[in-house]
Image: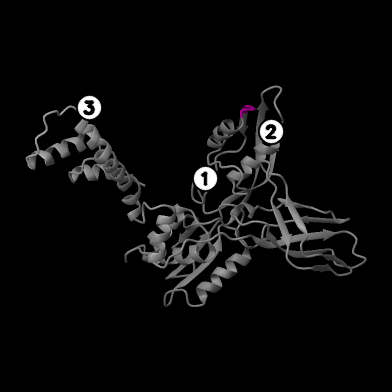
C-alpha cells in the first residue's frame, strides 16, 4: 500500500512543519502586524520564549495531526481503535477471536467393555517451537462394548488460529488411559479458531463491503459474506468463474492460514448462503482448496557440536505448508509458485546450527491446490 506523506500535504497547503519554517511564519505574521523585533537572533530572549510557548507545542500538534489524526481519518490507513470507529460508523464490526472446536478420534484395541471418556479430558499437541496446545473435551463420550473408535467433541483451551493444527498433531492425553490412543484427522475441525481480526484483513473487508458497482461487485459481495461468516481471511478466498456447472455458475475455494478446511465448515457456509444470502438466480457453491499429498526429502548438515535441530526444522517446513503457525516462513498459496530455494534461505536465517540444507524436491508449480506433506525425511 502506497504511503501518504501528510506532512508534505500540509507543507503544500502553507502550514509550517519544522522549527525554521515556523519561525519564518511567525516573523511574517509579526511584521504584517507592525510588531518590530530588533534582535532576530534565534537565541534572543524573545525567540526563545516564542519557541517554548508557541513553536514547540505547535510542532507537536502538527506532528500528531500528520502521523495520527490525518491517516486515521481514512479507513484505508486507519489502525486499531481508529479503524474500529470506522467500522462502527458503517455497521461493520471487527471479527472477534474464536476458540477451535473439533472432533478428536479416540481408538482402543480392547473392546470387551464400555468405557467413558469424561468431559474435561485434556489433550495435548506435540511440542512445536517449545509450545504445546491443549484441547478439552466438552461432553462425556462412551465407548460401547465392541466399539473400537469414538469421536470426542473438543474445544481449545484458548482462542486463536494456532490451534487449527493439521492432522496428526494432537496425540497426547494429559492423563493417559490404558490402551487408548488419540489423533486429529484431516476433517477434524468443526469451527476453525481465529484471532482478533488484523487491521489488514479488516481493511480488505471494508474494501469488499463498499466496493462500487462494477465487474468485481459480485466477487466483493460474496467475499464479504464468507469472510464475515467464517472468519477466514479475505485473501484466502479464491473464485473459479469458468462456469463449472454451466452458464452463470461459480465455485468458491477456501483455505486457512493454519490447518485444513473441514466439511463441517463448508456445510455451514453453504447452508448460510443457500438460506437466502445470495443474489437471485445465483449458482454458487463453496469448496475447500484441494490438497495434494507430497513427500519432502531434505539433505541436512549441521555445524559440529550443535544441538540436533531436525525436529524444529521439520516443524518450520510444515509451517510453510500451513500445518502449524509457530514459525513464519513464506507459506504456500494456491495458484502460486512455491520455491524450495527460498525455504532453504529462510531456514538458514532461522537456524544458525545449519551448515548446509538442500531439498531434493523441485519447486511446486502453480495450481489450484495446496500441497500437504505426508512425510519429511532427512537424508
Q: Is 179 on the left or on the right of 268, as rendered?
A: right
Where residue 206 appears, as percent x and y from the top left, is 40, 60
Q: Is residue 46 above or below residue 110?
A: above
SS at circle 2: loop
The residue segment tinted magenta is 352-356
Which circle, 2 or 3, is nearer the viewer?
3
Q: Mark 3 — residue? A: 43
Q: Residue 204: tell me if it is visible.
A: no
Other residues around mark 1 within 10 Å, as few (<14) / some (14–19) / many (≥20): few
Where residue 14 appears, as percent x and y from the top left, is 17, 44
Q: Residue 276: tell me if it is visible.
A: yes
Mark pair 2, 1: CA separation: 29 Å
- Which quadrant of the structure image shows residue 75? bottom left
The reply to whether the magenta stretch includes residue 49 is no
SS at circle 3: loop
Q: Residue furthest right?
A: 112
Mark pair 3, 1: CA separation: 67 Å
- Which quadrant of the structure image shows residue 103? bottom right
Name the colouring of the figure: one colour
Residue 311's label in the rendered image is none
Front-lying residue, 10 or 231: 10
Q: Earlier in the sequence, mark 2 or mark 3?
A: 3
* Majority secondary structure of magenta residues: strand
Where residue 300 appears, as percent x and y from the top left, is 66, 30
Q: Mark 2 — residue? A: 309
Q: Earlier in the sequence, mark 3 or mark 1?
A: 3
Q: Mark 1 — residue? A: 365
Residue lying at 20% horizontally and 33% vertically, measured from the top left:
47
Amino acid at each position: 500500500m502506497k504511503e501518504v506523506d501528510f506532512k508534505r500535504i500540509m507543507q503544500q497547503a502553507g502550514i509550517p512543519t519544522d522549527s525554521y519554517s515556523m519561525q519564518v511564519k511567525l516573523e511574517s505574521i509579526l511584521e504584517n502586524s507592525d510588531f518590530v523585533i530588533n534582535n532576530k537572533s534565534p537565541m534572543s530572549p524573545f525567540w526563545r520564549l516564542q519557541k517554548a510557548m508557541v513553536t514547540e507545542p505547535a510542532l507537536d500538534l502538527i506532528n500528531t495531526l500528520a502521523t495520527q489524526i490525518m491517516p486515521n481519518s481514512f479507513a484505508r490507513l486507519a489502525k486499531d481503535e481508529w479503524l474500529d470507529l470506522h467500522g462502527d460508523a458503517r455497521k461493520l464490526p471487527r471479527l472477534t477471536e474464536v476458540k477451535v472446536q473439533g472432533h478428536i478420534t479416540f481408538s482402543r484395541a480392547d473392546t470387551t467393555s464400555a468405557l467413558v471418556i469424561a468431559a474435561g479430558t485434556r489433550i495435548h499437541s506435540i511440542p512445536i517451537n517449545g509450545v504445546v496446545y491443549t484441547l478439552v473435551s466438552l461432553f462425556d463420550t462412551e465407548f460401547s462394548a465392541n466399539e473400537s473408535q469414538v469421536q470426542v467433541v473438543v474445544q481449545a483451551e484458548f482462542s486463536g488460529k494456532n490451534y487449527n493444527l493439521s492432522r496428526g498433531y494432537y496425540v497426547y492425553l494429559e492423563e493417559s488411559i490404558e490402551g487408548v490412543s488419540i489423533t486429529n484427522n484431516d476433517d477434524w475441525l468443526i469451527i476453525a479458531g481465529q484471532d482478533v481480526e488484523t487491521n489488514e484483513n479488516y481493511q480488505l473487508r471494508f474494501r469488499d463491503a463498499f466496493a462500487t458497482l462494477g465487474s468485481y461487485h459480485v466477487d466483493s459481495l460474496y467475499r464479504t459474506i464468507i469472510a464475515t461468516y467464517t472468519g477466514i481471511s479475505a485473501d484466502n478466498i479464491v473464485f473459479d468463474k469458468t462456469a463449472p456447472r454451466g452458464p452463470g455458475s461459480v465455485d468458491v475455494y477456501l483455505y486457512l492460514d493454519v490447518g485444513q478446511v473441514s466439511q463441517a465448515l463448508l456445510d455451514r457456509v453453504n447452508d448460510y448462503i443457500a438460506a437466502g444470502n445470495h443474489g437471485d438466480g445465483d449458482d454458487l457453491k463453496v469448496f475447500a482448496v484441494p490438497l495434494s499429498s507430497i513427500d519432502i526429502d531434505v539433505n541436512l548438515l549441521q555445524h559440529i557440536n550443535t544441538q540436533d535441530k531436525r525436529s524444529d526444522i521439520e516443524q518450520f517446513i510444515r509451517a510453510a505448508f500451513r500445518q502449524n503457525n509457530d514459525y513464519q516462513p513464506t507459506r504456500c498459496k494456491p495458484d502460486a509458485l512455491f520455491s524450495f530455494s527460498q525455504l532453504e534461505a529462510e531456514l538458514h536465517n532461522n537456524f544458525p546450527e545449519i551448515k548446509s540444507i538442500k531439498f531434493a524436491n523441485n519447486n511446486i508449480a502453480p495450481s489450484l491446490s495446496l500441497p500437504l506433506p505426508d512425510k519429511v525425511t532427512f537424508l
